[in-house]
Amino acid sequence: MSDLAQGVIKGDHRAIARAISLVENNRSTAQEMMKKIFPHTGESIIIGITGAPGSGKSTLVDQMLGFLRKKGKKIGIVAVDPSSPFSGGAILGDRIRMMQHSVDPEIFIRSMATRGHLGGVAKATGEAIAVLEAAGKNFILVETVGVGQDEVEVVKLADIILVILIPGAGDEIQVFKAGIMEIADIFILNKADSPLAERTEKQLRAMLDLGLGGKAPPPVINTVATEGKGVDKLIDEIDKFVVDKDRELRDSRKKKLIPWMLMDIISEKIYRSVTRDIKASEFEDLIEKIHRREIDPYTVADKIVDRLKKGR
Ligand SMILES: Nc1nc2c(ncn2[C@@H]2O[C@H](COP(=O)(O)OP(=O)(O)OP(=O)(O)O)[C@@H](O)[C@H]2O)c(=O)[nH]1
Ligand SMILES: [Mg+2]
């Protein structure tokens, strides 16, 4: 295991891939590796990119890669695949689109499925980000479809949150009701080559001006990701965010995540001990009793927690 952590810290891509698989599979062995890499985390810039299915996230990420690589930055990419009816084979498409960068030894690309995570998508993604940080990536781009609560949690892991909208966005804005609009640092109006772009931009700016009560609205940048248009401006805005004046903001964001991360780890440990301590047959029995209203679930939960505390 220490070999794996060392491999990660050296930036070895095979070690990174194995480490991420380990946290994805939620094996408790991942914990030893995570402990070792933790001191090496916390220095990367994490960019969350979210938007409706097909809004151009992957195309834009691909374009951003070109710019960041020219600046000599090492990059990690995590594409969170919602495994839901919203995404139809997007991962394969992502792979193909990112081919032009796939041979670059300083770029690591990984997609993660959201389905079937015991400890939550955000936890696994957070750990994958930590692995990439320990591996010395300067920028970590996290692509996620902004449709559900899980995705909102994932995007909160980022230092900078980019929200992609597309023209004709009436419906689009609905998609973001889960609270993503409120936490955006930069809005991107992609597919600005559409005739509807101008109108949507006006609507978006009007909405942002209304919504923020005195605070300066976040920047809105028009892009045509397929042609690379506007990507230079986007990189400039990100740079502005990264410079010192926002160091404090980023720092306080990172700090705010710690109680959440800690509670996540603790609840997973409790969950594990409960499932280890209680026999399946006893559990079945309790469920029967609750179902028949012979006992309430609160009393059952209290009893189980008491038993855990006493270590019986
Ligand atoms: N006209 C136009 N098409 C674009 C633009 N950006 C992306 N597209 C196209 O839109 C489609 C979806 O782009 P993706 O980059 O796969 O979008 P995505 O948001 O990653 O999609 P999912 O991962 O499936 O949610 C592709 O066919 C792109 O070529 C743009 O600025 N203008
Ligand atoms: Mg995509």
Image (cartoon, helix red, strand yellow):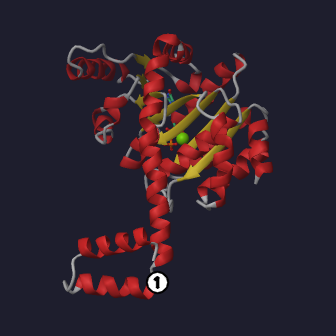
- Residue 198 in the image: x percent, y percent? 34, 17
Quadrant placement of the C terminus: bottom left
Q: Which quadrant, please, contains the N terminus?
A: bottom right
Q: Residue drawn at (74%, 42%), measured in percent from left and top? A: 8
User: Horizontally, is 179 left or right of 161 in the view?
Assistant: left
Quarter of the view holding residue 166? top left
Q: Quadrant of residue 218?
A: top left
Q: In the rendered picture of this protein, how many numbered marks are placed on residues?
A: 1
Q: Could you tell me residue 175's position as x and y percent?
A: 32, 41
> Ligand 1 within 8 A of label 1's CB?
no
Q: Nearer the viewer, residue 69 or 117?
A: 117
Q: Residue at x 25, y 74 (%)?
A: 299
SS at circle 1: loop
Q: In the image, is residue 173 above or below residue 119?
A: above
What residue do we see at 55% from left, 18% from top? 231
Q: Is residue 16 above or below residue 23?
A: above
Q: Is residue 64 left or right of residue 157?
A: right
Can residue 127 be seen here?
A: yes
Place of residue 139 in the rendered image (x, y in percent of width and height, measured from the top left): 62, 27
Specify the amino acid type for callout 1.
Lys
* Side (left or right) of 106 relative to 292: right
275 or 168, which is in the foreground?
A: 275
Q: Nearer the viewer, residue 96 or 296?
A: 296
User: In the rendered image, is residue 55 in sight?
Assistant: no
Mark 1 surroundings within 10 Å by alpha-carbon count, few (fewer than 14), some (14 through 19), many (20 or more): few
Give coordinates of residue 97: x percent, y percent. Answer: 65, 37
Q: Which residue is mark 1?
A: 279
The residue sitting at the front extreme is: 310
Q: Is residue 280 above or below residue 228?
A: below
